[in-house]
Image: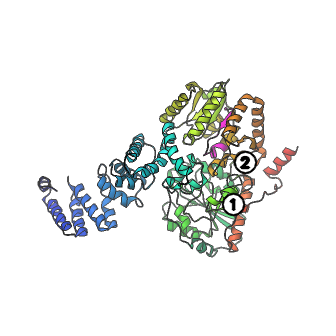
Amino acid sequence: MNFGEQQETERADPLAWLLALSGEGLAGVGLKRVAASVFSVAGGRGGRNAARSLKRALRLYFEAGDREKAWGVSNRLRHAAEGDPDTAFIMFSLAREGAGQPALCALQRTLLGSRNLQYIRLALSIPLMDGDSDTDYALLQETALFLESQPGARGASAFLSSDLVTWALMRCDFPAARRYLGVVQAHLDSGRYGIVGRSIGFHLLHWSGDEKAAGYALGNVISPPPPDARARRMAMPRRVDDGKIRIGYVSADFFARHATMKLLGNVLERHDRERFEITLFCLSPDDEIRQDDAEREKWGRAIDVKAMTDEEIAACIRENGIDILVDLKGYTINHRCRIFNLPSAPVHVAWLGYPAPALNVDLDYVIGDPFVLPDSARPDWQETFCRLPETYQPNDPVGRPPIAPAARADFGLPADRFIYASCNNPLKIVPRVIDLWCEILRRTPKSMLWLHSRGETQWRNLLREFARQGIAEERIVQMPFEGDYARHLNRMQLADVGLDTFPCNGHTTTSEQLWAGLPVLTVKGTHFASRVSESLLNAIGLPGMVARDDAAYLAQAVALYEDRELLARNRSALETGRFTRPLFDAERFCRHLETAYAMMAARARAGLQPDVIDVPVLPPREGSFEARAATAAAS
């Protein structure tokens, strides 16, 4: 503090000035904690120089190693760190584990804009912001260019490329996506998987089909469980021994509008209550539950645990005597994966929410099927495979709206054109996919592409890329967001062929298209997320819509345009398969799932370690949907 500043402070608050002067003296003789407390008092008096005193207290507590006191001061400086990289550096160091994401995002912006390599590296130590802001996107690109220009910083620039791939794809900025993908892919091709070590795993699945890479994505990683975690769980005594198997489901998505419950709801209702007791450990937001019109009690007994600590949730799970605890979230938004690293239940299972290994989570099994979890994938998973015989994806044939007749004119579509459609999130449209789509359109001159988009930036960039590849704008039709779910499903049938994305397929979206009667063309995948459509197409009796590679995908898309009889046969098979094949048979699926649970529970009660479970195909039950379907097919 210079003399002029001292005079200004003295006029404003003489006591604050004396405290600050005393603090500097104490700091000068090495009494940092005492000096910090004096500065904290000075800052607490308010006034124009309060922030300066609090920043001094923050730094002194931080240098003295008193992180608890530093954290307390930092809470009083939330807005003062913007534009002050030195303060942001300390606050970010303290906040990585203790602060909410919005606070970290603001601090990241300040650190990235500092052009200080130490500060930038700290900002890059966790996944970057949320991808929504064009200003943030520009800042990240400028930071990448800066790092490339700094000797010894190109490794940090490469790390940043893995984040920028996602940010570019969120905007359908294909020139940038190609550039950053090239950097990341060069590392992966040479076995340098550390390039994705900070990536958010859920994002990585959208643009990398490398199953091994998914296990390296540490974006949401938690501390690993203790080495004896499984042994402690398996030794847990049963609280109730009445012959029932108690299943606990953990999710923040227990409301009807969420994609998970569009799939799972009817299966939960069909659980055999004589053999299974179902408890939902609910993390769902209150506003979603208030808006929900689902009869949630049909799914199971719900316990609201979102306000509890992880330890309290684990204790609640134990008190309810849960035998098998199923995580429906994985590393996705609002997850509480750490619950599974506490002694919660004898058996821990991952299913449905996250199609990749959940690194550092104490899980015994992952539920899949022979398509999404082939034997070749086993080395890349820490979870043991439990494979259902037909498909891993449940589907609700009751809660989903029935498909009603619809007309193209109602949705601005021409009656005389062949229409390809993509209903997936545009984040899944990687350069490889849009290049194939452009070639398909070039070879099918009277076709159009009906394309889902979520905003002006995406749509503008999509049209720009198609134009760059010689596709006229009038051949690309926007499929806007539709809030009416029944109307959304009904419009899908109006296309001729659904074009899948890869390496991340449509998941719920693919089953929705099949429910609507729209055949989907996909490519055989290389990791779980890229094999989902293959699983669903086989479960509904359309294995021929799974192309072996990109060239076959292109050829088949063109063949369906040129051979309308071939297209008609596929649509007819789909229409029949909706009511006779396993995909939309929730009763059959539930029986296979319950068999899987019974096999898991039997191993655990016998004291056996998890081993690969392949659930056998069960015979039709008399009078069931599947028995009636078999009779209809035979006749």
Q: Is residue 534 left or right of residue 165?
A: right
Q: Nearer the viewer, residue 318 or 30?
A: 30
Q: Position of residue 315 (x, y in %)?
A: 54, 70
Q: Is residue 100 magenta?
A: no
Q: CA distance from mark 2 to mark 1?
A: 18 Å
Mark 2 residue type: Leu
Mark 2 and mark 1 lie on one chain; the one further toward the N terminus is: 1
Disc number placed over residue 386 in the picture, else none: 1
Q: Is residue 497 magenta?
A: yes
Magenta range is: 494-510
Q: Position of residue 454 (x, y in %)?
A: 52, 38
Say if residue 252 shows up in the picture. yes
Where residue 95 sits, quadrant-wise, is: bottom left
Q: Nearer the viewer, residue 450 or 585?
A: 450
Is 257 above or below relative to 13?
above
| Colouring mode (rainbow / by chain / secondary structure / one colour) | rainbow
Say which element carries label 1.
strand
Mark 1 residue type: Cys
